[in-house]
Image (cartoon, coloured by chain):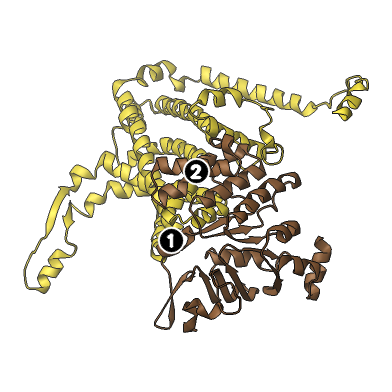
């Protein structure tokens, strides 16, 4: 239990000693009301890895993702991001809840992209991107604007800098949302079904931005229904059902020969 | 493109010329209303009790205009300013995670919404009975002094005579503003709660604090919901200033009109004058509210298109003229196709 703070325990199995563990979840439990949404989720994502989480709706995959940045409180287990326990501090063998400020500080380094974009509608694309860097990271306005413009250019929206979200397509909005998360220089990016609310023809532009991010070595956890993306970009694939990880492994292998019956049934429906 | 051509090739059919549905009920209604209007006008013109010329001579007298400006209008503005400010604070307390603040806020709204304004004003007008002097300093100073055997210990910083401070205007302002704050708190709370919770989550995920989220993300969006009912509250407040005569506040429109009526034994014409004055003032506010609502919240939450139009309005503020001119009527300028239509 106390050994958990020392990450050495986890490293031996693989030969890749250089890749440190960025996100680690141990036996995560979460209930809402009488419903047990998560029933013991274990996960390990190394730095620079792209981990895709698949599963039917109601399998708890989105909930799990929201637990990683403490948008949801977990009832049991532990989650570490970059060796830091999320939402709690362990002291004298007891867990202490973190203060709101400390939670906010942790969230700074965890970027999140939502299914429904959640852009601030009263701010332009650039204002959306620079808001948190200015308010939270205390960057100067000029610095934030410069970096914000660069980020919007990177997601292919250089010409939409001063446009309000209401005038952007879904794909464009989601790309602004990605730029907004990147502006906080996160160590890890969480994607909660980033393309599920998009028209089919707009999915590609968002996935392209995400591929680009993966190529640059960003650690990413992606809850998605895009099997193609998982196969092509994912370094690992996790299949969840009923609040537990049913199967995990290399995306190609899991998709080609699912070992578990439930995985097989799900993939048969999706593919 | 080719399919479009195919459809345009076909000859346009003759426009439909159908017999419209008849509405005999409307004609009956018009007839009834015409008779009622005629009766009303007849009373206005023939009943001597109206004393029209007396009313017109007296309703613009200097004390009445003074009461209107220094009492009614000034009081409405001051009470609303305090009421809105305090109301926002109380709403934020109510939605806070701190259970103590939540309880205090609940108690406040419970009390000030339960007690009628008229009663509240009477209480504040007579609060001088409770304290002849209002003083600020260490609480329970005399009692603490007695504990240590000191008689009449007073640790006061400053104080006022109640009759100087809490009479007339100040007492009335206190009563109206505190009561208004309770109603405004409910409006602001509804406004805040109407904002998509995803907005707060997005801000939280970026590491923004609750305060920053509220100020920068939630409140600006809640304003669109808050402003239209605040307009209603302002109009209600304007009318409720007539209750000030029970404080009493003498420098106030209705008090002055009533005074003229009682002095001259021509009460009814002055009450009619009051109706006309409040009608005029409310109408001015209604016009203001119309423009405010059109700007901030017309049709908000009803149709997607209205919402997009709003965003475009927001997008074009600064160049506000474009928004004012362009949004009348249907505006089929394609703004409704925001999410799906335009590919990147």
Q: Which chain is brown?
A: A
Image position of A108 with respect to B243: above or below: below
Foreground pick, A221 / B169 = A221
Residue marked by disc 1: A105
Foreground pick, B218 / A86 = A86
Quarter in which the N terminus of chain B is drawn: top right
Q: Residue at x 43, y 56 (%)?
A: B209
Left/right of residue A85 with respect to residue B170 in the rendered view: right
Per the rendering, the colour in which chain B appears is yellow
- Name the chain letter of the residue that bears numbered label 2: A
Q: Earlier in the sequence, mark 2 or mark 1?
A: 1
- Quadrant housing residue A167: top right
Q: Is residue A69 visible?
A: yes
Quarter in which the C terminus of chain B is drawn: top right
Image location of residue A160, percent across then percent down: 58, 36
CB within 8 Å, label 2 to label 1: no
Which mark is on residue B178?
A: none
Q: CA distance from mark 2 to mark 1?
A: 21 Å
Foreground pick, B57 / B155 = B155
Q: Secondary structure at mark 1?
A: helix
Foreground pick, B46 / B321 = B321
Image location of residue B288, percent across then percent down: 48, 29
Residue lying at the far left of the rendered structure: B150
Residue marked by disc 2: A148
Left/right of residue B199 with respect to residue B153 in the rendered view: right
């Amino acid at each position: 239990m106390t050994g958990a703070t020392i990450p050495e325990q986890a490293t031996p199995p693989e030969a890749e000693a250089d890749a440190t563990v960025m996100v680690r979840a141990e036996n995560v439990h979460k209930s809402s009301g009488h419903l047990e949404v998560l029933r013991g989720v274990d996960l390990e994502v190394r730095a620079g890895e792209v981990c895709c989480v698949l599963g039917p709706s109601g399998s708890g995959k989105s909930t799990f993702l929201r637990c990683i940045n403490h948008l949801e409180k977990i009832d049991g287990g532990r989650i570490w991001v970059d060796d830091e326990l999320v939402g709690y501090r362990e002291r004298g063998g007891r867990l202490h809840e973190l203060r709101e400020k400390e939670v906010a500080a942790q969230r700074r380094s965890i970027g999140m992209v939502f299914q429904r974009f959640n852009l601030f509608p009263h701010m332009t694309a650039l204002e959306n991107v620079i808001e948190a860097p200015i308010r939270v990271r205390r960057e100067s306005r000029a610095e934030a604007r410069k970096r914000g413009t660069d980020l919007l250019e990177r997601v292919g929206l250089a010409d939409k800098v001063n446009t309000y979200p209401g005038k952007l397509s879904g794909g464009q909005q989601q790309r602004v949302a990605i730029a907004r998360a990147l502006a906080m220089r996160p160590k890890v990016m969480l994607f909660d079904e980033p393309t599920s609310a998009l028209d089919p023809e707009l999915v590609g532009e968002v996935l392209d931005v995400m591929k680009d991010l993966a190529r640059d070595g960003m650690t990413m956890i992606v809850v998605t229904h895009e099997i193609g993306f998982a196969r092509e970009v994912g370094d690992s694939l996790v299949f969840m059902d009923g609040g537990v990880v049913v199967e995990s492994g290399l995306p190609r292998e899991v998709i080609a020969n699912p070992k578990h019956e439930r995985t097989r049934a799900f993939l048969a429906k999706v593919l | 493109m080719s399919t479009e051509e195919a459809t345009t090739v076909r000859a346009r059919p003759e426009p439909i010329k159908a017999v419209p549905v008849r509405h005999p009920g409307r004609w009956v209604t018009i007839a009834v209303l015409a008779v009622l209007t005629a009766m009303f006008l007849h009373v206005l013109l023939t009943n001597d009790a109206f004393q029209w010329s007396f009313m017109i001579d007296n309703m613009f007298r200097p004390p009445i205009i003074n009461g209107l400006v220094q009492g009614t209008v000034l009081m409405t503005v001051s009470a609303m300013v305090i009421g809105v400010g305090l109301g926002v604070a109380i709403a934020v307390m109510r939605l806070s995670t701190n259970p103590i603040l939540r309880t205090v806020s609940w108690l406040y709204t419970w009390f000030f919404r339960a007690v009628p304004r008229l009663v509240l004003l009477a209480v504040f007008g007579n609060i001088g009975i409770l304290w002849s002097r209002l003083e600020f300093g260490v609480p329970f100073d005399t009692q603490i002094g007695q504990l240590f055997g000191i008689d009449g210990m007073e640790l006061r910083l400053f104080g006022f005579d109640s009759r100087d401070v809490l009479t007339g205007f100040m007492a009335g302002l206190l009563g109206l503003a505190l009561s208004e704050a309770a109603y405004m708190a409910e409006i602001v709370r509804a406004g805040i709660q109407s904002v998509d919770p995803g907005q707060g989550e997005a801000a939280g995920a970026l590491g923004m604090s609750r305060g920053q989220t509220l100020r920068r993300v939630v409140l600006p969006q809640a304003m669109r919901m808050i402003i239209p009912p605040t307009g209603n509250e302002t109009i209600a407040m304007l009318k409720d200033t007539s209750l000030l005569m029970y404080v009493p506040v003498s420098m106030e429109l209705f008090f002055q009109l009533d005074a003229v009526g009682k002095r001259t034994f021509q009460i009814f014409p002055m009450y009619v004058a009051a109706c006309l004055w409040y009608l005029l003032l409310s109408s001015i506010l209604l016009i203001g509210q119309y423009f405010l609502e059109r700007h901030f919240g017309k049709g908000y939450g009803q149709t997607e298109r209205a919402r997009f139009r709003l965003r475009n309005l927001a997008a074009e503020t600064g160049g506000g003229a474009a928004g004012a001119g362009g949004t009348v009527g249907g505006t089929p300028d394609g703004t409704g196709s925001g999410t799906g239509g335009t590919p990147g």
